[in-house]
Amino acid sequence: MGQYNKIDETQLSIVDGMIDWVRVVDRSNIVLYANKKMREDLGDEIVGKRCYDVFCRQTNCDYCISKVTMEHGSILKKQSTLGDHTYMVISSPLKDDSGEILGSVEVFRDITTEIKLSKSIREKNRKMSDDINFARNMQIRMLPPKGMYNGVSIDYLYESSEVLSGDFFDVFKIDEDNTGIYICDVVGHGVSASLLTVFVRQSLRTIAKGNIHLNTIMKELHKTFLSLNLDYDKYFSVFFGIYNKKSCRFTYVNAGHNSEPILLRKDKSVTMLKSKGYPIANIFDNVQYDVSTMELSVGDRLFFYTDGITEAVNLKGEQYGVDNVINIVRQEGNILENIKASLDSYCKDQKDDYAMLMAEII
């Protein structure tokens, strides 16, 4: 106990009131001192024992941080499991007035609760991640299959800034002659936005079944949305149209969708489908929309898109803009692949959801 006699008791008295275990060990692994909390939990007789005997072990730890501390004077820490508890052990050198290292001061902080909480959080995060990935897969599966719909061939781009997207579109059969086509943009991102895209999909398919009166459809969609009693910051825009394969007419309304669809004629001329209307939100008690109609021909292509495309910005903060979209849809080749390549080149960090649906009259 020669080393113990050289220890200044005043250096240790301050730790006697700590709730953590504190002990001093010498170069022979003998416990020279243990604070009140450690003696209460493990017994007064731990002083004088070898450090590993205290924890009913036969040999020293594989990695003894106190040994390194006493050799180099460094402060080290490690995580150690003792029984059913986990501790963060911090080893610091204990020096005398001349700077000689007398031993290592070991502080044992019980982190069992933190470890269990961290494990629980990781497990819940894993479960949440699995649920979100499942929802993402479901959202993708709800997109309409690419191919033919009553004289219309569809293809599309679909990208999300997060795992779940607030952009969505759908193509579905209303009756033998009429096909519903829409694109919507729900405010925000993530789970809440994606749930609203499911609402829009199911509601429009139900309301428009056998119904080709656009104002009636949109009024009912608005009424159904109001019944959800959501907060005022939850709303969405939607551009909805109906294509009749017999008359080749496309009738449409715009409920607040600020990205006007592009009509590319077979002769490469471009027309913007302009129409105004309020978004679907609970700040309006009643809605009325302007209904527009145009005749289409074989080879004409309609491009529906969200503002994630036109408002994408480059490193200079400049928006991609609708003019870039128009220039690319006029080019030869695969238009959607060209759009994607152009966007990837223009803005390396795509931060918003975006979607583009191409409908070609066949």
Image (cartoon, rainbow, N blue to C red):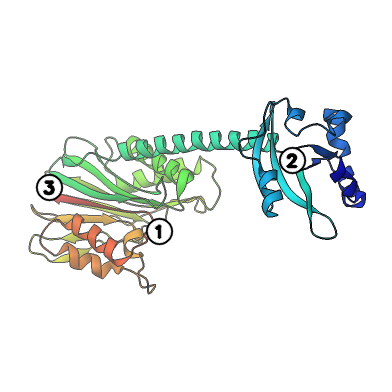
Side of 193 relative to 177 (left or right): right
Q: Tell me the mark number nearer the camera, choosing from 3 and 1.
A: 1
Residue 335 horizontal/vertical position (percent): 17, 57
Residue found at the very far front of the displayed protein:
2
**Residue ID at (83%, 35%):** 38
Q: Quadrant of residue 57?
A: top right
Which amino acid type is marked by label 3?
A: Ser
120 and 86: which is toward the camera: 86
Q: CA distance from mark 2 to mark 3?
A: 79 Å
Left or right for 137, reference 90:
left
Whether residues under marks 1 and 2 lie with C-beta atoms below 8 angstroms apart, the answer is no
Q: Is residue 72 visible?
A: yes
Vertical position of residue 318 compared to residue 222: above or below: below
Task: Identify residue for label 3.
Answer: 247
Give the mark nearest the N terminus, 1 or 2. Answer: 2
Residue, disc 1: 351
CA separation in Å, label 3 and label 1: 41 Å
Q: Residues within 10 Å of mark 3 (few under 14, many from 20)?
A: few
Q: Position of residue 28 (x, y in %)?
A: 75, 39
- Point out the tag, 3 or 1, that comes first from the N-terminus: 3
Q: How many neighbours does mark 2 have within 10 angstroms: few (below 14), some (14-19), or many (20 or more)?
A: some
Q: Nearer the viewer, mark 2 or mark 3?
A: 2
Residue topped by disc 2:
109
Residue 111 in the image, given as x and y percentages of width and height: 70, 38
Q: Name the amino acid, label 2.
A: Arg
Residue plotted at (81% across, 41% down) = 23
SS for dot 3: loop
